[in-house]
Image (spheres, rainbow, N blue to C red):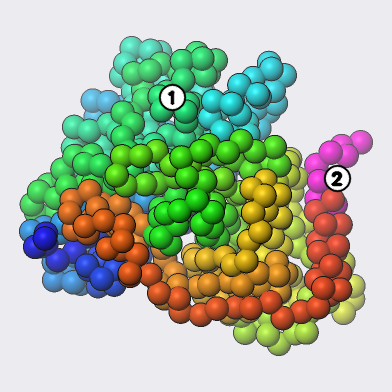
Amino acid sequence: MNEKQYVIAMDQGTTSSRCILFDRRGAVRSVVQREFPQIYPQPGWVEHDPMDIWATQMGVTMEAMQKAGARAGDIAAIGITNQRETTLVWDAATGNPVCNAIVWQCRRTAERIERLRRDGLEETVRRKTGLIPDAYFSASKLEWILDNVPGARERAERGELRFGTVDSWLIWNLTGGRVHATDCTNASRTMLFDIHKLRWDPELLDYFRIPSSLLPRVLPSSSIFGETETFGGSIPIAAAAGDQQAALFGQCGFEPGDVKSTYGTGGFLLMNTGTEAVPSRRGLLTTIAASAGGETRYALEGSVFVAGAAIQWLRDELRLLDSAAQTEEVCRRLEDAGGVYVVPAFVGLGAPYWEPYARGTVVGLTRGVTRDHLIRAVTESLAYQTNDLLRAMKEESGLTLTSLKVDGGASANDFLMQFQADLSDLELQRPRYIETTALGAAYLAGLATGFWRDQEDIRGNWACERTFAPGISRERRQSLLKGWDRAVRCAVAWARDED
């Protein structure tokens, strides 16, 4: 048995960086989180400063170790989980970024994806990568950087630059530039990786004109990526996984049919499909699931681009809230949203619609609508969008879902969870620890280093904190969903009717 005391989870998210130290029971012994700036150069564009990502992640890690009184010798391993698809390019010699990171939410390459469809590559992308062509993924973002940053394409062709998602950027910096690697879950979100052959795809690389020298080595999620001396001693970096795959693993979603829904900046529903890569025709994605033990596993995924980010919009841009936690109190003051629906398509609509030009829409306004009604409608939008994914996933998988494990920051909102149960006619199970993304990264790293013996060893750590059972009539449910479907049609019509 490993004598180390803790596993570090570096949880690098879209709006904040966080570090959590877990003990052998999967309990949190220390946590530090820090937000960093979001950059919006133009409408629909979203960027991060790569140095903000690095600096905040290092800062919270050192602080979390200090809070726990932990030194490098106490740490068994580091596991990294990260915002996916966000695209970075840096100088191979100096490690300096060539430009800001283009964030997964950014829509600047939407027209480029339309050209890909006109070129007849949509089915090729679906077949090889499991993805629906979209500006969401890394490929067109990387091409944009090479074409628009002065000298970038020439330098890339000379082998002077490196590309990575956020995990690769952190691993590169943690190892002082010695290791350029990613894991299969992050690679599967680039739209450049063949999820069946487990390799970067030559045809797609050629289409986007991406030199192979840019690309990181791809390893299983639970692997020894390298070692870091950053924290006063040698610690193995033993896991990397995209945030949603890590959350599925953290929810102990090890078996085919296991489903979880995460309520974070975006919303994400994942179902483990085992060793079979299930193709989707209803707007879901086929992706690689995080796993330990060397066997490649797959998942079906539905993505909501704006979930918790809509609550942040109420707080930061509209200034209707002092904190996101206030939404529960406000929602409970009302019987309903007063007939108001908000479709928060700030950067287009994800699954199952995939309408990149849709924009945020508010419908049902009357003179009697108040601030509170708007807040409730925005909060309810998280549940409506998740229900859209559930409907598609039930049709796609052919499975009858009876329960759903939930996690992520907004799952702490009891009103939202009850509304989700009512809307979806499902029992929701919320675990004792809702930040399962970080826990999944820790588990993957701990399994790679012997901190935990096997998956059964960690399954015993999962505990349900609260169950939410549906409690409204069928007629009420149908009425609510009919209104939402009309609101979505309005958001889509805005995108399509340019005359």
* Amino acid identity at mark 2: Ala
Horizontal and vertical percent for residue 473?
81, 78
- The answer to whether the residues at label 1 and label 2 have Cβ atoms under 8 Å apart is no
Residue 34 included in the magenta stretch of the image: no
> Horizontally, is 56 left or right of 479 in the view?
left
Indicate which label's residue lies in the foreground, 1 or 2: 1
The magenta stretch is: 490-499
Q: Main secondary structure of the magenta part?
A: helix
Residue depicted at x 70% and y 66% = 424
The C terminus sits in image quarter: top right
Residue depicted at x 81% and y 64% = 481
The N terminus sits in image quarter: bottom left
Horizontal and vertical percent for residue 46?
55, 44
Q: Distance between the residues labelled 1 and 2?
A: 39 Å
What residue would you read off at disc 1? 197
Residue 498 included in the magenta stretch of the image: yes
Residue depicted at x 19% and y 39% = 226
